[in-house]
């Protein structure tokens, strides 16, 4: 397993153990980096206007279109490290 993959998996574990829950904007950023890293470019139809949470998630993920899986993993790891340093 590559170092980046190991760091990504460790960051997934670390984010769960943060002392404080990150704000919604940060959670959305983490979600979009995770989805781009694991699933690639956004798939499926955009949720309707009445499902605000799903719509925001879709839009955040769609904003990363074209980002490589490795780039998204690095961004996810960096964001989790930033959060851990704030504690």
Image: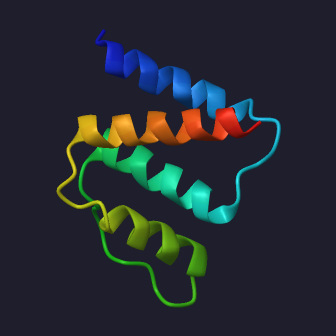
The answer to whether residue 17 is above or below residue 23 is: above
Which quarter of the figure has residue 86? Answer: top right
Which quarter of the figure has residue 34? Answer: top left
Question: At x 25% / y 34%, what residue is drawn?
Answer: 70
Which quadrant, please, contains the C terminus? top right
Camera-nearest residue between 44 and 26? 26
Please name the colour scheme applied to the rendered image. Answer: rainbow
Residue pushed farthest bottom? 49
Number of callouts: 0
The location of residue 20, given as percent across then percent down, is 81, 44
Which quadrant, please, contains the N terminus? top left
The location of residue 8, given as percent across then percent down, is 44, 27
- Direction from residue 6 to residue 51 in the image, left or right: right
The location of residue 2, given as percent across then percent down, is 29, 12
Question: At x 34% / y 13%, what residue is drawn?
Answer: 3
The answer to whether residue 67 is above or below residue 19 is: below
Residue pushed farthest top? 1
The answer to whether residue 76 is above or below residue 61 is: above
Question: At x 54% / y 28%, what residue is drawn?
Answer: 11
- Direction from residue 87 to residue 42 in the image, left or right: left
Camera-nearest residue between 87 and 71? 87
Residue pushed farthest front? 86
The location of residue 19, given as percent across then percent down, is 82, 36
Which quarter of the figure has residue 38? Answer: top left
Question: At x 39% / y 42%, what residue is drawn?
Answer: 75
- Direction from residue 71 to residue 22 in the image, left or right: right
- Direction from residue 67 to residue 39 in the image, left or right: right
């Amino acid at each position: 397993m590559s170092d980046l993959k190991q760091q990504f998996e460790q960051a997934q574990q670390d984010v769960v153990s943060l002392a404080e829950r990150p704000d919604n904007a940060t959670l959305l950023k983490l979600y979009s980096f995770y989805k781009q890293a694991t699933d690639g470019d956004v798939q499926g139809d955009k949720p309707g206007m009445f499902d605000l949470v799903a719509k925001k998630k879709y839009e955040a993920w769609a904003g990363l279109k074209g980002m490589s899986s490795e780039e998204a993993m690095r961004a996810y790891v960096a964001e989790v490290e930033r959060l851990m340093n704030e504690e």
